Image (tube, rainbow, N blue to C red):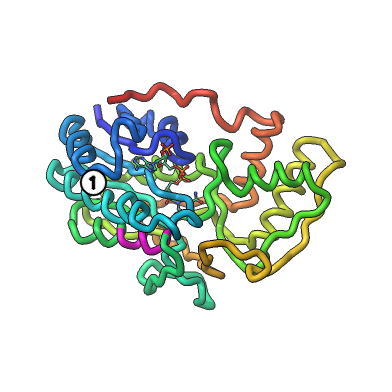
Amino acid sequence: MTTILVPGKTGQVGWELQGALAPLGNVLALDRGRMDLTNTDSIRRVIREAKPEIIVNAAGYTTVDEAESEPELAMQVNGVAPGIMAEEAKRIGALLVHYSTDYVYDGELNRPYLEDDTPRPVNVYGASKLAGERAIEAIGGAYVILRTSWVYSNRRTNFVLTILRLARENKELKVVDDQAGSPIWARALAEATADLLRRKDLIPAHSGIYHLSAAGHTSRYEFAKTIIRIMREVSGIADGWASVKPITSDQYPLPAKRPRNPVTDKDKVQRVFGVEMPRWEDQLRDFLAGLSGTAPPAEAAEPPAAGSL
Ligand SMILES: NC(=O)c1ccc[n+]([C@@H]2O[C@H](COP(=O)([O-])OP(=O)(O)OC[C@H]3O[C@@H](n4cnc5c(N)ncnc54)[C@H](OP(=O)(O)O)[C@@H]3O)[C@@H](O)[C@H]2O)c1
């Protein structure tokens, strides 16, 4: 049976991968206690012991603002560790799937980015993720790098859960209207990754970078309004929701600058691997219906059986 190693099991994507990848093999999902990405020896040792056919790296340093004050740590986890994984994967002939971000772009292009447009990160997080991409590319094994965008789930902290909370606690929310993205439910991303791996024989000949996020795009402001509108509908709770007002990023300064419009073209992953994503609004509706209890739960309390090392 195919062994699939998944570092980052406690994260939004890593959690969902455990269920989505289960039909494809024996999933060995690892928390940071089993594989610490700041410890090169730990990465090498675990991969050498497990000898997986596939590694799907869902671990990463993801706190964009904190990265500004911890650049070495962000670089070690996002920039260096993926290269070590790629080296070990190549040594044993394993495929590597790795997640990156549309924050590698500066967001100043006036059309959707293509995978070979020049990345110009505007913050430490983006620079560290770009370094990870380059480290994997330099090893030259069989790999797929998936640049995704605005991930949410019912775990950890994310934009959707934050808006839902703030919208009940306040009368008015101010949300930036000059940043765009393609919000994706972690479950949809995990399922798309599984679809891609169903065609894993294509990876050696098509190693490279692919955009993979929801179809369509939106601004943070429109996204917030849509979260509240759909939640009102699916929950049946009509009152007690904040109104949403647009502001600019300058009116809401944060430690890390954000790219303004890093919207990506997603045709390549569809052309090469046949992976097609639903529109962001449809994913959001499914997710919120699960959260409000009007559809099957968005996420089981425990992921389906996954192995551990
Ligand atoms: N979230 C987004 O909006 C977004 C957007 C674009 C791209 N991405 C990329 O998508 C991937 C998955 O994101 P996500 O939202 O699922 O992230 P997440 O929920 O923040 O989870 C990150 C995972 O990485 C683990 N981790 C962090 N530092 C580690 C270390 N030193 N050693 C081992 N494990 C470590 C965390 O473990 P602990 O639980 O122990 O902290 C957690 O399991 C990442 O590569 C991210 O850069 C995310």
Q: Residue furthest front?
A: 69
Circle 1 Cα neighbour tier, 10 Å, few/some/many (<14 / 14–19 / ≥20): many
Ligand 1, what quadrant? top left
- Front residue of 100 and 94: 100
Residue at position x 79%, y 47% in the image: 170
What amino acid does circle 1 point to? Met
In the image, the segment drawn in magenta is 125-131
Identify the image quadrant of the C terminus: top left
| 260 displayed left or right of 25 | right
- The quadrant holding residue 295 is top right
Residue at position x 33%, y 49% in the image: 77
Residue at position x 45%, y 38% in the image: 11
**What residue would you read off at disc 1?**
85
Q: How many marks?
A: 1
Rendered location of residue 86, percent (x, y): 22, 49
The residue tagged with tag 1: helix, strand or loop? Answer: helix
Question: Is 284 situated above or below 291?
Answer: below
